[in-house]
Image (tube, grey):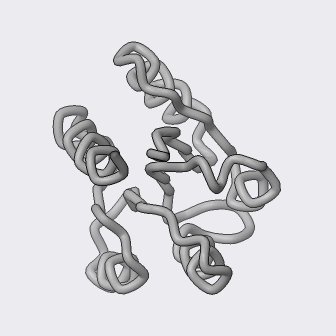
Amino acid sequence: MARSTICLVDDDPSLRASVSNLMSSLGLEILVFDSAETFLASDCIEDTGCLVLDFRLQGMNGLDLMAHLAAASRAVPTIMLTGNDADIVQQQALALGAAAFLTKPLNPPEFLAAVRDILARQA
């Protein structure tokens, strides 16, 4: 069964709202979380087809969440977001299996292409 839910983990309420509105307007199912811990406590991990994850979060950061999921054999196709394009963060995210690494502010066509590519691989 294809996993088609998009989960967004970001502590910025305006980004959560804008991405949620964009995905919903395209008929895509999205769930939003304000922290890695909230995402981990949810019951949607198994249904997540694409995890959109901010690097800088309160508490557990994005790389820590990716490592935690991988260690638990629950790796999820991930798009890592960051406010800067630090090479070391990008290298670490890609080493942990990130499918894409995008900088904020998001470029909607680039972001949508990355999400659609990941979801197409889940089909």
Question: What percent of the width, then of the height, locates residue 27?
Answer: 41, 17
Q: Is residue 13 above or below residue 76?
A: above
Q: Is residue 100 above or below residue 6?
A: below
Question: What percent of the width, then of the height, locates residue 66?
Answer: 54, 73
Tag count in the figure? Answer: 0
Q: Residue furthest front?
A: 1
Left or right: 19 as drawn, with respect to 37: left
Tell me the residue at 42%/61% (across/down). 78
Question: What percent of the width, then of the height, locates residue 16?
Answer: 55, 34
Tell me the residue at 55%/44% (across/down). 7
Q: Which quadrant is home to the C terminus? A: top left
Left or right: 119 as drawn, with respect to 64: left
Question: What percent of the width, then of the height, locates residue 65?
Answer: 62, 71
Q: Is residue 10 above or below residue 40?
A: above
Viewer-proximal residue among 73 and 115: 73
Viewer-proximal residue among 85 and 32: 32
Left or right: 41 as drawn, with respect to 85: right
Q: Is residue 66 above or below residue 56?
A: below
Residue 72 in view: yes
Tell me the residue at 60%/71% (across/down). 74
Left or right: 93 as drawn, with respect to 20: left
Residue 82 in view: no
